[in-house]
Amino acid sequence: MQPIFVLVHSPSVGPSTWHPVAEQLAAAGHQVRVPSLLHIGAGAPPFWPRVVDAVRDDLRQVPAGSPVTLVAHSNAGLFLPVIRSGLDHPVVGSVFVDAALPARVGPTPVAASEFLEFLRPMAVNGRLPRWTDWWDEADVAPMFPDPTLRQKVTEEQPTLPLSYYEQHIPVPDAWDDHPCSYLLFSPPYDDAAAEAGDRGWRVAHLVGEHLHQIVDPAGTARHLVELAHTA
């Protein structure tokens, strides 16, 4: 049975960052799910159980026993171990896409202390601006292929609480008891890709910006299929 691709977006953005790739995978005959994590920032911490619940709830539409390949972008990579441990469906592969890696031994902080110092002055009543508002226009504009998609991704972004980035996420034992791999886009994630290689994972490189999956969804889909089949 061909595994179902479960494309998990960063909670800092939204599911539209995966929709172009999902369309490419579906056109190639693959089953795809894109769970929405847009509401996980509501209420008080901890937030990570809501991520697990969102993915598990989305997969209720998938027959029990159907194998899945988890694909996590950006800081969604930190949640992949708890997602894998919280699913009823068998996970046969995990692909980290320009993603942060969970600690070898948890728990894993969502943000390092120096990055929290960058974030804290931006918080108003405990909530942060949208992710694309953190950066200069010169950094944001190259990530988007056209104004329409930029508007869609931008308007969809949540305003997460600062406490989301202050949380620590458990790393369950033996979560990586299946093939894992890494797809690198951008230089800020070079170290994560190198670490993935040190862990014995297969690493592929598709040169681009951090949201390259919306710039080259066809190329991203091809790499995901290859990594899922050969990891």
Image: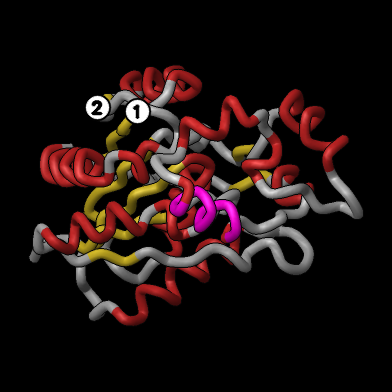
Whole-percent x, y for residue 61 in the image = 32, 81
* Segment tinted magenta in the rendering: 148-155
Residue 104 showing in the rendered view: no
Whole-percent x, y for residue 195 in the image = 41, 21
Marker disc for residue 67: none
Up the image or down, 188 lies above or below 165; here it is: above
Magenta span main SS: helix
Q: How far is mark 1 from mark 2, CA to CA?
A: 6 Å
* 90 on left or right of 44: left
Whole-percent x, y for residue 153 in the image = 51, 53
- Circle 1 — which element? strand
Q: How crowded is mark 1: few (under 14 residues within 10 Å), some or many (20 or more)?
A: many
- Circle 2 — which element? strand
- The residue closer to the viewer here, 227 or 25, is 25
Q: According to the image, label 1 marks what residue?
A: 184
Residue at left 43%, top 66%?
A: 35
* 210 on left or right of 28: right
Marker disc for residue 204: 2
Name which residue type carries label 1. Leu
User: On the image, which quarter does residue 97 sit in?
Assistant: top left
Residue 165 showing in the rendered view: yes
Tag 1–tag 2 contact (CB < 8 Å):
yes
Judge whether residue 149 is colored magenta: yes
User: On the image, which quarter does residue 180 sit in?
Assistant: top left
* 1 on left or right of 180: left
* 135 on left or right of 31: right
Residue at left 49%, top 54%?
A: 82
- The residue closer to the viewer here, 14 or 170, is 14
Judge whether residue 135 is colored magenta: no
Residue at left 50%, top 48%?
A: 150
> Dividing the image into 4 quarters, which one contains the N terminus?
bottom left
Whole-percent x, y for residue 149 in the image = 44, 52
